[in-house]
Image (cartoon, rainbow, N blue to C red):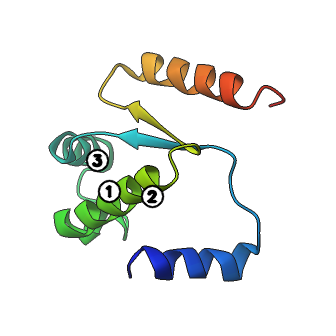
Amino acid sequence: MGIDHVREANRLALGDLAPDLTLLLQLPAEEAEARARHRDGDRADRIAARGAVYHSHVAEAFEMLAKVEPHRFVRIDSSAHPDRVAAQIASTVEERLPCA
């Protein structure tokens, strides 16, 4: 779709509303696929079943948004142990959204 179309779709749906914070959970594609297979077995949902090319385009789109709006995005390395990832998420939310 391209970033302009995504932004226009968001504007139509949300008006002037935009998130104060977006957490971009990053994981190498191979590891993400292995985790999904481990979690879902052969029962991938319709999004997971779309394949590597689709997921690569989605990751690229989020990366582009993060570069264009760095004030809003925080990248989180999701390859760490889940407890560590959760702690980083909690700490980021507390730091960036102290009212939450």
Tell me if residue 95 comes above or below residue 62 in the rendering.
Answer: above
Q: Is residue 1 left or right of residue 22?
A: left
Write down the quadrant of residue 97 in the picture.
top right
Q: Is residue 15 left or right of residue 74?
A: right
Q: Which mark is residue 36?
A: 3
Q: Residue placed at 32% from the left, 56% from the top?
A: 59
Crowd around label 1: few <14 · some 14–19 · many ≥20 (10 Å): some
Q: Residue furthest left?
A: 30
Write down the quadrant of residue 13 in the picture.
bottom right
Write down the quadrant of residue 9 in the picture.
bottom right
Label 1 to label 2: alpha-carbon separation? 10 Å
Which residue is denoted by mark 1 in the rendering? 59
* Of callouts 3 and 1, the N-terminal one: 3
Front one among 29 and 10 = 10
Q: Residue placed at 45% from the left, 24% from the top?
A: 85
Secondary structure under the numbered disc 1 in the rendered image: helix
Q: Is residue 35 left or right of residue 100?
A: left
* Residue 49 locus on image (x, y percent): 27, 67
Which residue is denoted by mark 2 in the rendering? 65
Badge 2 amino acid: Leu
Q: Residue placed at 67% from the left, 22% from the top?
A: 95
Secondary structure under the numbered disc 2 in the rendered image: helix
Residue 73 appears in view? yes
* Of callouts 2 and 3, the N-terminal one: 3
Badge 1 amino acid: Ala
Label 3 to label 1: alpha-carbon separation? 16 Å
For the residues bearing labels 2 and 3, Cβ distance under 8 angstroms: no
Secondary structure under the numbered disc 3 in the rendered image: helix
Q: Residue placed at 28% from the left, 47% from the top?
A: 36
Residue 44 appears in view? no
- Disc number lying in front (1 or 2): 2
* Residue 81 locus on image (x, y percent): 35, 19
